[in-house]
Image (cartoon, rainbow, N blue to C red):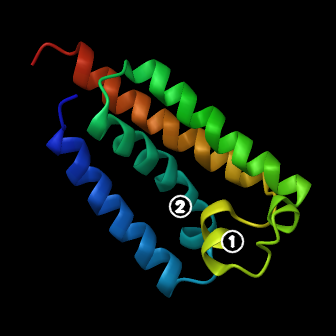
Amino acid sequence: MKLNQTYLAITSLLFLIEVAIALYLKTGFIRHTFGDFLVVILIYCFIKSFMEIHFLKLALAVWLFSFLIEFLQLTNILNAFHLQNNLLAKTILGSTFNVFDLVAYTLGIGAVLVVEYKRNFTAN
């Protein structure tokens, strides 16, 4: 296993942006949509920091994981684990299902695929 410092740096930057969004923005497009767009990119880059895995496989896995978490919100997963009052759990897992989150995750993974495709298949 070789640490990829580029992906780790991107992960760190995205994590700081996500923390700032969570701390300082309580409503609006950036909090509710752009943060979801960024979080799938953050997860993707975090995994790529430590694992050499084909970008298509990882992008699909992250996309499916994000959808799983979103659909678990329909089941009141936080209540099932008695975490409904845990701010960290609510911030990480979310507490309400929103179809627009699925769109944001899809667009985020789409952005990853565009960048990775250009990075892997252009001759410059």
Residue 97, relative to residue 55: is it above or below? below
User: In the visual, does 18 lie left or right of 3?
Assistant: right
Q: Position of residue 46 (x, y in %)?
A: 36, 45
| Secondary structure of the residue carrying numbered label 1 | helix
Q: Callout 2 environment at 10 Å: few (<14), some (14 to 19), or many (20+)?
A: some
Q: In the image, what residue occupies the spot 27% across and 40% down?
A: 49
Q: In which quarter of the image is residue 20?
A: bottom left
Residue 98 occupies which quadrant of the picture?
A: bottom right
Local packing at callout 1 (Cα closer than 10 Å; few below 14, some 14-19, many 20+) is: some
Q: Which of 18 and 91 is in front in this view?
A: 91
Check disc 2 and report the residue beneath it.
34
* Residue at point 24%, 48% (across, down): 8
Among the two numbered marks 1 and 2 on one chain, the one whose residue lies closer to the N terminus: 2
Left or right of 23, for residue 12? left
**Quadrant of the snapshot with the C terminus:** top left
Q: Is residue 51 above or below residue 26?
A: above
Could you tell me which residue is drawn at 22 percent across and 28 percent down?
A: 1
Three-letter residue code for mark 2: Phe
Residue at the image point whose x is 83% and y is 58% from the top: 77
Q: Residue 90: which numbered mark, if any? A: 1
Residue that sits furthest to the front in the current view: 81
Label 1 vs label 2: CA separation? 17 Å
Q: Are marks 1 and 2 in contact (CB under 8 Å)?
A: no
**Nearest the camera: 16 or 119?**
16
What secondary structure is marked by label 2?
Answer: helix
Residue 50 located left or right of residue 31: left
- Left or right, 48 with respect to 19, comes to left
Where is residue 5 shown, x and y percent of the image?
15, 44
